[in-house]
Structures are given as C-alpha cells and as structure tokens.
Amino acid sequence: MQANHEPPCGITTLLRDQFDRWKSDPKHLGLDWGYYSPDCPPLLFIGGGGVAARAVPLITVSIEPLRTHHFEAQIAQAAPSVRPYIDWNWSYFDVFPRVVSGVVQPYWRNMVEFGEGWSSARIDPTSPWASFRDFMIELPYIPMHACEHVPRASRAAGDALKDLFVARVEALVKIWPDATFVVLASAVRRQLERANLLDDLRPLVLSVSAAERGSYGNAFATRVAVGTLATGARPRVIVRHGPFSRQYNPRPEGRRELGRRFRELVARPE
C-alpha cells in the first residue's frame, strides 16, 4: 500500500504555517527562551511519510527534542527553506540518520523492542531507521529544542502548545482514522492533563506470571491507562506513567511485550 512520502494537504499547511511563523518570529510560541533555543524551526512530526495509508501507525507523544552535539547539523538541514524543513519532519527517519551519521542514540535504541512488539517485525538495533519509517510517528508536544527539561519553562505557552498539538492530532487522524496515540512519559501526561486533553482514563491491567515478571522486569508493571484525547476526533490514547529509562525501563523482552499488548488494544472496540 502506498505510503505518504509527499505530505497530504493538511500536514503541508501546518508545516508551512509554522515555518513561516518561525521565520517571521522565531520566538512566536512564547516559551521561556532561557531554556529553549529559537534557532531551529519547530519539529512538529517525527516521521509519517513512510507509513502506508492503511497501516496502523505507532504514534507516540514525547515531551520535546533536546539539544545535543548534532543540533547545529539539524539547523543546517531544517532552517534554510521550507522544502528541507518539510522533509526533516515528514521524512525524519530518512533525514535524521544522515544528520547524526547513523548513530543510534539510547532513546531510539530503547524503542527498538517496543517497535518490534507493535509491528511484529524484527528491527536491526544498529540501524532501525528504515523499520521505524514504516510504522512510527512521534509528536513532540513542545516542538522546540530544549537545553534540558524544565517543566515551568513551557507554562506561559500553554494555549499555543495545546492548539498546535490538537491541530497535529486532527491532521493525522484524517489520514489514519483509527490511529491510537501512545504516551510513554509522565512529563507528557502532565502537559496533557493541564491542557484538559485526557478524557475517560481507566486503568489497563498488565497481568503477568511470576516467570514473565522475571523476563520482563519489575518496571513492566508501571501504571498504564487507556482513554481518549479530548480533541474533535477523540482518538484513543494509551498513557504509561514512565519513560523507557531509569527505574521505569523494562527489560528488552518487557518492552517488546508492551508493544505487542498496546497494538492488541487497537483491534478492540472502545
């Protein structure tokens, strides 16, 4: 089935609008710019162009991109004009590996097994980009690069961030009407709660045997809830109360099983 390598109209409109606004006023989102850089345009979509129209994409919601040693290379890719900016977003899993010379950062390495569980396909951990391109999209709730995560630094921009997030959700649901959104970090959950974007959350029981607990790790049992995003389309959302890091990170087999169980929810009726 054909993938959306050229963004649909709604996606293109969003990207062009944000690029033009950033060119006109790099600080237009109203963040605390002591903690964020206005030098790189907003990263609205991490991927999308490689996902087939009839696929079931894994759409994760992250908190924000962080400034790292390859930040200047990302600016060089995204900032010159709108066409490379659109590619940087919608074709991220083709562009980003070139920007970072193929290095797989810990964040993406920890997504490999989760992606395997979701997609039922093996993913090369040394070069996962082509596999991610086929089924994964990520939405940074705050689309500007941060020096570090400081929750209070985005609060003044609450309304602008909510409006921009809702616009992205609605644009994606027009392409993938059965899309499910996955939140893997408490920082994102708190942003969505403050914006009144989580509705009808109910616990998801992750039953495991003693043997499975040993295989998956204690962090597999980190709380998970299922509900809806309070947007016009009201898509399903799965919220995990911890990222794949530190004490919240299951063992590889546990991340794989979480991906499989989350994917199973997509086929269930609400």
Image: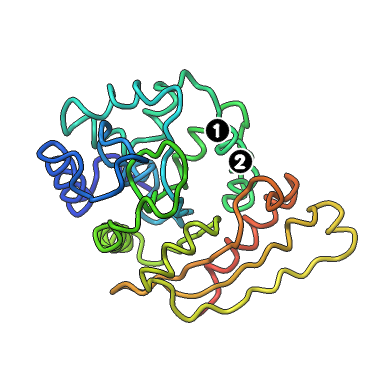
Q: Earlier in the sequence, mark 1 or mark 2?
A: 2
Q: Dividing the picture into quarters, in which one does residue 50 lie?
A: top left
Q: Position of residue 94 (x, y in %)?
A: 39, 30
Name the residue rendered at 58%, 47% in the picture.
115
Q: Residues within 10 Å of mark 2 (few under 14, many from 20)?
A: many
Question: On the picture, is 258 further left or further right than 32?
Answer: right
Report helix, strand or loop for mark 1. loop
* Image-based side of 127 in relation to 180, left or right: right
Measured Cα–Cα span from mark 1 to mark 2: 7 Å
Q: Secondary structure at mark 2?
A: helix
Q: Are marks 1 and 2 in contact (CB under 8 Å)?
A: yes
Which amino acid does the dot numbered 1 rest on?
Answer: Pro
Q: Is residue 167 above or below residue 40?
A: below
The numbered disc on residue 128 is 1
Give the image location of residue 7, x and y in percent: 24, 45
Q: Give me the disc on residue 112.
A: 2
- Image vertical order of residue 257 relative to residue 203, above or below: above
